Amino acid sequence: KQLYQKKRLEAALMELDQMLLNYPTDPKLHEMRGTLLDQLGYGELALKAWKQSVSFNPKNEPLKNFVSKKEKRLSLGEKK
């Protein structure tokens, strides 16, 4: 979180990936990974991470709705 706040997004992503090795089914970590990837310009990978988060926590309706909107935007060729 501190790396993210300091705008060290690549470092935050590497740290997060290490955490996912220990907690591979943690939906919050996958959600955070999606946000980092999106901010780094990797929209399709971000979407994949968010979908993974939803698969581990299907009751997260706000994220489900967000993912649906992102999918539509990506299919239309928009970045964000």
Image (cartoon, rainbow, N blue to C red):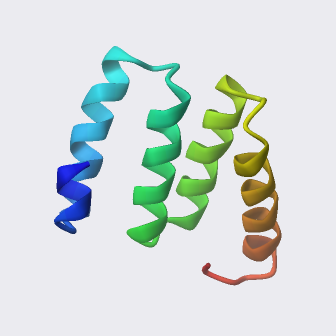
Q: Is residue 63 left or right of residue 61?
A: left
Instruction: Name the foreground residue: 18 vs 65.
Output: 65
Residue 19 position in % (x across, y down):
29, 27
Residue drawn at x 30%, y 38% is 16
Residue drawn at x 50%, y 38% is 30
Residue 47 position in % (x across, y down):
63, 54
Residue 64 position in % (x across, y down):
77, 47
Residue drawn at x 68%, y 42% is 51
Q: Is residue 48 left or right of residue 15?
A: right
Give residue 22's quadrant in the image: top left
- Asked if 36 appears above or below 24 in the picture, the reply is below
- Asked if 68 appears above or below 49 in the picture, the reply is below
Q: Is residue 11 visible?
A: no
Instruction: Name the foreground residue: 43 vs 1.
Output: 1
Instruction: Name the foreground residue: 74 vs 31.
Output: 31
Give residue 17's quadrant in the image: top left
Give residue 23's quadrant in the image: top left
Q: Is residue 30 visible?
A: yes
The quarter of the picture where the C terminus appears is bottom right
